[in-house]
Image (spheres, rainbow, N blue to C red):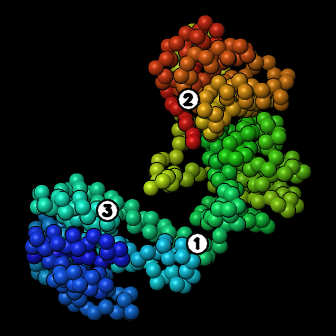
Amino acid sequence: MSYAFFSVTDKTGIEVLAKEFVAKGIQLVSTGGTRKYLLDHGFTVLPIEKITNKPEAFQGRMKSISFEMASGILFRRQDPNDLKEAADLQIPQIDYVVINFYPFAKKQSEGLSFDELVDYIDIGGPSLLRAAAKNFESVTVLSNVNQYEDCVRQLQQEGRTSIGYRKTLAKEAFLLTAKYDQAISDRFIREDKGDLRYGENPHQSAVANVDTTYWNLLMDNKEMSYNNYLDSHHAWLAALDLHKEYQDKSGVVVVKHNNPCGFAVHGSASRALELAWEGDPVSAFGSVVAVNTEVNAEVALFLKDKFIEIIIAPTYSEDAMQILKSKNNLRILQAPLAFPNHQQRTTVIAGELVQNFDTKTNWEIEWKTKNKITSKENLLRFSFLAAKHLKSNAIVLAREVDDGLQMVGAGMGQPNRIDCIKRLAIPRMKEYFSEIKMNEVVLASDAFFPFADSIDICKEYGITTIIQPGGSIRDKDVIAAADAAGIAMAMTATRHFKH
């Protein structure tokens, strides 16, 4: 005998599904409210107690969780040992699981208190849904009313559901349980730590679900905001990349609105900070400063009279802490020199996007032009690393200075590369570094040049060395334009878009 288990809060359309199950000789099983609904619609429904051999308990908190129910879903139909064990234990074969959860998010939006919301945390539903999804080779798991029509169609046409369809349903079930648990987790975090003052803007509510063992707030005289966490995230990822590539030097990144406005490495942490700050001293006001070596007294003294929101470092000297603690509105963060071990997730309409963090830096530089300036390859790597951490489209100008490397101009977040070069990177460099000669700097682009027009602009302003990923269908035209202009151009074959 094959069974279909129903336990739903939203009962839309279940009678159509139940009718098809009955037509296929499948026995319906259900819990209290769902069973009553099906009985009222003329179906014969086995109460779950006939399978669990236990009554509902604790005012409905205990209904569907049982050895018999979980076993009936999980045992492998293709495994002779499982089949024998199921028969010996008189385990029912539950081939269809139809579940949707208590409406936790909906009730939260209605303003229920924390204690009231606890009653809307579904336990049995997610447990059995996950069990059914795990055993998708044999079990069809339906977690959304929009899935019923396709299931009925397959049953009518094929007599059963296909393995591909069951696997898709399993994926959707796991996504649902993940989102459900995340909503509950967020509410518990909010109860424990409280809401952030607001989100990205004052009219947006927000909560921070962060690992406080990674972000160690050493001085909490002012709470972290939503934007503080975002800027700290981007600043520290860039600082980690600098540490990976220049372990014998100090790397400093100054970030404003998720973009580095200062980027430098030097043997001295204080000098690296000076170089980074010089990159754009106007934008550095109210910034996040990330230092990937110990913050010493010299670094702290440089920042003492400057307004920054946050400083991040792996360690701080005692003298530095004494100086920094005098800045009442400063947040002091300690973070490890370790990349996050989770994936990058971005919520979009109707779902989320998941990808690995972009930690690639081991580029193979290949010169594509007749002119090759191999002596500048270290500077080119540095400039390309800086471009990687800017919002696309991104252009970086960088130079060697005082045994260090410094970003001296940047253009980012523009729909085209020409504006990044002509209207942002070069004018900023000329404003803050009027003494620099153009042949002293290199230019990096986070993605390929689609046309030769960017090369024409570089020639116009006297730029002599370029690094870019390549990969355009017009690479030959771009290389030819660089050769004609006497520009040395290298490619990495790696793009670093950032949105």
Residue 230, x across and y down, in percent: 65, 53
From where the camera sits, is residue 64 visible? yes
Q: Which residue is mark 1?
A: 189
- The residue that appears at 18% across and 82% down in the rendered structure is 42
In the image, what residue type sits under mark 1? Ile
Name which of mark 3 and mark 2 comes first in the sequence.
Answer: 3
Query: Mark 3 touching mark 2, by CB under 8 A?
Result: no
Image check: 298 left or right of 288? right
Depth-wise, is mark 1 or mark 3 nearer the camera? Answer: 3
Q: Is residue 308 above or below residue 271?
A: below
Question: Which SS class for mark 2?
Answer: loop
- The residue that appears at 61% across and 76% down in the rendered structure is 192
Q: Is residue 315 above or below residue 459?
A: below
Depth-wise, is mark 3 or mark 2 nearer the camera? Answer: 3
Image check: 149 left or right of 492? left
Residue 87, x across and y down, in percent: 10, 78
- The residue that appears at 19% across and 88% down in the rendered structure is 50
From where the camera sits, is residue 85 visible? no
Image check: 20 left or right of 292? left
Disc 1 from disc 3: Cα separation: 32 Å
Image quarter where the C terminus lies is top right
Residue 142 falls in image quadrant: bottom left
**In this figure, what is the number of numbered marks?**
3
Pointer 2: residues within 10 angstroms few (<14), some, or many (20+)? Answer: many
Q: Nearer the viewer, residue 330 or 296?
A: 330
In the image, what residue type sits under mark 2? Ala
* Extreme residue in the right direction: 305
Q: Which residue is mark 3?
A: 146
Disc 3 from disc 2: Cα separation: 41 Å
